[in-house]
Amino acid sequence: MQVLKAADHRRMPWKNGKGETAEIAVFPEGAGLEDFGWRLSMATVSEPGAFSMFSGIDRVLGIVEGEGLQLSIEGQETVVTLSGEAAAFPGDAAVTSQLLGGPVVDLNLMTRRGRFYGRIERVGGHENCEITANGVATLIVLLAPCNVSSPDGLVPLARLDVVRAEGDETVLVMPCFAALDLFVVRVFNEGEEAGKLPQSFTKP
């Protein structure tokens, strides 16, 4: 198990130069925007506009904070909200966004088409949750403070910290002061069958 603290996420400009991204993890390590196999990041969207184009890349986008976004993907409208499912779309499609309210923070998984594919699942509740790693990578993005188990005991983690589970290990996540609230992000090799994800929930 590897803990990726929110303060350590690498800050870098958007490809179109109109914002900033906090890069959580990338494969291979140190890869740039032109040569990554997969990449997980967070960004603040504070105004409407066009998304950067990424040729040969597929994207999955979830909302971490804020009301949400209305996306126009090649002219087709879809809404992604804090309580709804993540939106999947090609990175080389023409995509524009409108804010449903104020600024939002989004979670963005990008995978190189033909090599990898990914999923983002929202998980929550008042009980402890066991998350078992599978696929190429499993990352747990915390949206509320919690404790996680480790061989050395309990590790307290803050909002927006990330746990990366390795191999087939199981991570026990325990809520602290509020209900459990997190994203489980999984990356698979193309052609690999996805394992069962934890049960999702819809926030009231």
Image (cartoon, rainbow, N blue to C red):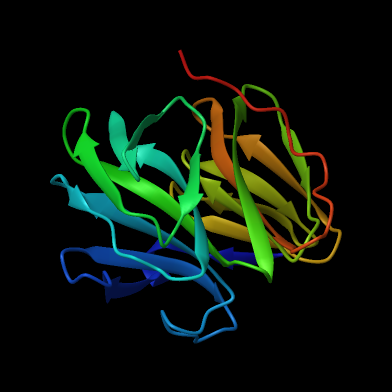
Q: Can residue 185 be seen in this view?
A: no
Residue at 13%, 46% in the rendered image: 47
Picture coordinates of residue 141 (x, y %)? 53, 50
Number of marks in the rendered image = 0
Residue at 60%, 22% in the rendered image: 201
Picture coordinates of residue 192 (x, y %)? 83, 59
Residue at 29%, 33% in the rendered image: 70
Q: Quadrant location of residue 8?
A: bottom left
Q: Which of 12 and 58 is in front in this view?
A: 58
Q: Which of 113 and 121 is in front in this view?
A: 113
**Quadrant position of the N terminus in the picture:** bottom right
Residue at 16%, 34% in the rendered image: 102
Q: Quadrant location of residue 188?
A: bottom right
Q: Nearer the viewer, residue 40 or 97?
A: 97
**Quadrant position of the C terminus in the picture:** top left
Depicted 196 relative to depicted 24: above or below: above
Q: Is residue 18 visible?
A: yes
Residue 142 as seen in the image, left or right of residue 135: left
